[in-house]
Amino acid sequence: MMADGEIIFRPYFVQQGRGPHMGDFVRTFDTNEDVFYSDMEVDEQGIRIQNTHGQEQFGLYVRWNVEGFGYLYLPADNGGEYYPADEPSGADYNLNYELALTRVMRNRKRLQSFQEDTTWRPSRELKAYLDLGEEYLEDAGKAQSEPVQCAQYSQQSLKFAMYASDLLELEKARFDIRNQPPRPDFLFGCDTRGFFQMDEHLFLERFTPLFNYATITHYLIGDHINFEPNEGDKQFAERDRLLDILLEKGITVEGRPLFWTHSWVTPDWLKEKSFDQTLTYLEDHIRKVVGHYGDRIKVWEVVNEVHDWANELEFTPDQFIELTKFACEVARDVNSDVKLLINNCCPFAPYIQKRKWHEKEAKYPQRTPHQFTTDLLDAEVDFDLIGVQEYFVRHPVAEAVRVIERYADLNIDVQIAEIGAPSAGIKQEFVDEDVDPTTKPYDWRRHWDEELQADWLEYIFTYAYSNPAVEAANWYDFVDPYGFLKKGGLLRSVDGETKAAVDRLQNLKEKWAK
């Protein structure tokens, strides 16, 4: 039964396997594709949207099992027209059809934009996937009076449309690379904590053929070598040695971060400071750190992930804007030649629906990374680059690309600051327990292995290299088992055995240099 005014998206589980086929965590997004909080209930009977808190139109992300492709968070937005939130008599949607409609329409619009701007045309394989998605969607539309049959056609449409969306992005990026000059200044990057985690000579032997850009971390605590576990006791020596070696190899270096307020990296002495005291500390910190390195470090990540995801100090949204602006001004005053980067994570902002600062209850209204960035621009914050993180977070390639392009539309240069995917099983970021992958649907194409990890690397690096607005792409991390992403390194262990992603990246670089 439906309550008055309730909007329900009804799933029809036409998949053959044992599932699960739908996740119980759903997010709504507005017509700008920013996630917002909604009151809803989710069960096998459907997704019941009860209150969108003033949003007049919405779309939603739901994790849905597309057998033959993957168990991913997929958008439904009424084919780009969005759903009206105010339905006095309620509304009842076939979720399968809505997911297929949205993917087919997004493919159609993307294809049209590519063909209008260039001489590119889809391959025979891509055209077949696109056509099958369209044809099955047409069949589903004709069968809407028979919900199960409609759902079956929709599921087929969705499968082929998902393959098409992946291939569409890759083919167009490859076309653009072939039709533009090589980019000798493009920055192929990676984190360098592996220097301290394995034999230094072996690290350099594996690292330097792949990368011309490197990040050196300055986490106050929680790093392999903590930078400032006790206030004022900054650990420069080890980082200076690493920096000197990287510069000798001709590698451009980024320092990161000057400020991050996650529980993992925030020492007790910093937690005890008021906002004003934090600003006083931050000015001293930035002057000493940026001043110490001078022109040897070319890019500084000023703040990391302060867009309401992790907020150990419990600052308000306005305070974070003030702090970020202040930090950029100080860094610019110390060294006007250094590039300043703002690094954002969680591109699909799940924390908003959860109302969480990581594990803590959020005390203030939250915003997406994109909204945070526009707030910075409105406040005339002086920075040069936006860092976008593209870990595999169970969203399709096409949605990852849309995230990057939303920033490029703001006329801001982009670095893909962190890229990652696992190379085994179904382990995900921040998940420690072992899970038998055969007991769950696979995320993307099949259960994770080294070649599939290499596929994710190829998709993201290829898109980055093809887009002039993207100046760098950085893999994170280098060596297992020390990465934030479980099994996410490019080396299997400190013994230096390389994974398939290493060969894939090397082959891409050689091809693009011609």
Image (spheres, rainbow, N blue to C red):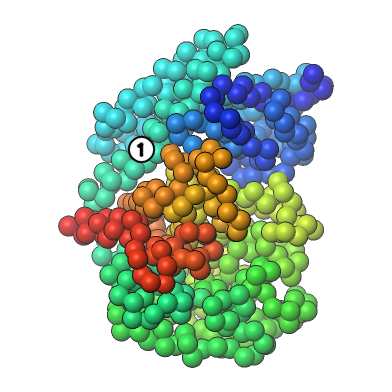
User: In the image shown, does 8 or 84 lie closer to the viewer?
Assistant: 8
User: In the image shown, does 48 or 176 lie closer to the viewer?
Assistant: 48
> Is residue 72 at least partly visible in the picture?
no
- The location of residue 229, given as percent across then percent down, is 64, 84
Question: Crowding at label 1, few (<14), some or many (≥20) Cα neighbours within 10 Å?
Answer: many
Identity of the residue furthest to the left in this view:
514
- The location of residue 158, given as percent across then percent down, is 48, 27
Relative horizontal placement of residue 496, taking residue 229 as reference (left or right): left
Q: Residue at x 36, y 75 (%)?
A: 203
Pointer 1 residue: 167
Local SS, label 1: helix
> Is residue 507 at least partly visible in the picture?
yes
The amino acid type found where label 1 is placed reads: Leu
User: In the image shown, does 345 or 179 lie closer to the viewer?
Assistant: 345
Numbered marks: total: 1
Q: Residue at x 71, y 21 (%)?
A: 91
442 over 350 or under it: above or below: above
- The location of residue 12, given as percent across then percent down, is 61, 21
Q: Quadrant of the N terminus?
A: top right
501 over 342 or under it: above or below: above
- The location of residue 267, given as percent across then percent down, is 69, 78
